[in-house]
Amino acid sequence: MNNYPPSSILHPRKILVRGTNWLGDAVMTTPALLRLREKFPEAHLALLTPEKLRDLWVGHPAINETIPFAPGESVFAVGKKLRAGKFELALVLPNSPRSAIEVWLAGIPQRIGYARPWRNSFLTQTLEPRADAVTMRKRSVAEIKRRTGVAPASKIIPDKSETGETPVLHPAAHQIHEYLHLAAAPGAKPEPIAPQLFVTPEEIEAAKEKFGLDKIIEPILGMNPGAEYGPAKRWPVERFITAAREIQNRTKCVWLIFGGASDMQIAGQIESAIRHSAFVIRNLCGKTSLRELMALLKSCRVLLTNDSGPMHLAAALGTPVVVPFGSTSPELTGPGLPGDSRHRLLKSDAPCTPCFLRECPIDFRCMNTITVEQVVETVIEAVALPDA
């Protein structure tokens, strides 16, 4: 039996938020965290987060403490670690059974999360899906072929998962509202605010000096040609190269290439294609820490990027982003606050989008229909925006 006073439920002194496991998702939780801080200004708010994302939260005003867990760390070890914190309220952002079991093992008396199979008994309050929630359903290959006419409709066996035409999505469908709805359960405001992350001027200065950018007077533009989820989210690398050349000709910019270890081959291909020209380019793929990446993204005038974690990072740091969208939906997981005019989201009109697949099963028409000319002109427009 936990010896918590009844008032701890309505006025918790120690709150645990079980954070999400992916970078982009973590950025999209910041509006909910800020709303929690607004509701409980005196509470100690701790975030349980994967070790790889711990530095994301350095200096964030919503968070008092981060509790990292390592890959492979057992649910029992995590529960024991949390029990020592004597938390009174837990907000479980992921939908997994494990995340609910962790806070149950910690003995936290109030445990709030979405109702999902195999975990409801570990929560004290379960929330049903929002009325505006939209499920990101993967299209089957049969549905994609039917929609695009790649194969005669008469030869395609109908897919039972098809539900008709793609619905028109509105701003309330965005993923940030899923987390805000959870935060509203203990009394926080559900109204959306923009995702926000923070770096200090000292971090920016140190990162620029480390990578030889401290004396640069030309505009700095970023490029993020990878996407961890899979190739279906990546605008073709040859188009990144052509667009980068044209944008540099028109802006005299310095290009920074960003990405993780899995993006090094793509980044190297881009660097190799243009390094013998007059362009100034720095390939930083796999070379930055998370805090250095954030500092350099903050230094960029614009980031040209695929739908990815760095896209969300840049937007939350106040840097405009230009994003070709193909297999995914900007209405559901786009950067920043839906409708933010600083960001330029280029959508394909292919009838199979969004499919939410990792790889295209046909001819990649969603990304191939977004042209170099469109991207170049859109980046130039974004460069011309007044500084925030």
Image (cartoon, rainbow, N blue to C red):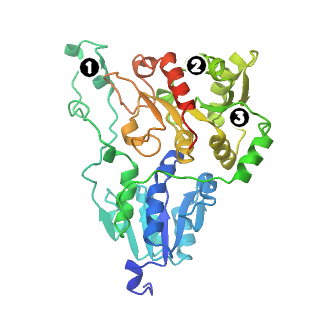
Q: Where, by quadrant of the figure, is residue 362 drawn?
A: top left
Going by the numbered disc 3, the residue's amino acid type is Leu
The residue singled out by tag 2 in the image is 243
Q: Which residue is mark 1?
A: 146
Q: In percent of the image, x 36 and y 30: which residue is there?
A: 355
Image depth: mark 1 or mark 3 in front = 3
Indicate whether 285 appears above or below 57: above
Q: Which residue is mark 3?
A: 284
Relative horizontal placement of residue 123, taking residue 146 as reference (left or right): right
Residue 176 got which mark?
A: none
**In the rendered view, does 205 fall on the left or right side of 344?**
right
The quadrant where residue 100 appears: bottom left
Residue 7 visible within the image: yes
Q: Nearer the viewer, mark 3 or mark 2?
A: 2
Looking at numbered disc 2 in the image, what kind of residue is underneath it?
A: Ala
Q: Is residue 9 above or below residue 50?
A: below
Neighbourhood count class around disc 3 (C-alpha, 10 Å): few under 14, some 14–19, many 20 upward: some
What x and y, as percent, mark residue 175?
A: 39, 48
Looking at the image, residue 228 sits to the left or right of residue 163; the answer is right
Q: Is residue 9 above or below residue 67?
A: below
The answer to whether residue 71 is seen in the rendering is no
Q: Are marks 3 and 2 in contact (CB under 8 Å)?
A: no
Q: Position of residue 173 (x, y in %)?
A: 32, 45
Q: Quick one: label 3 or label 2, which is nearer the N terminus?
A: 2
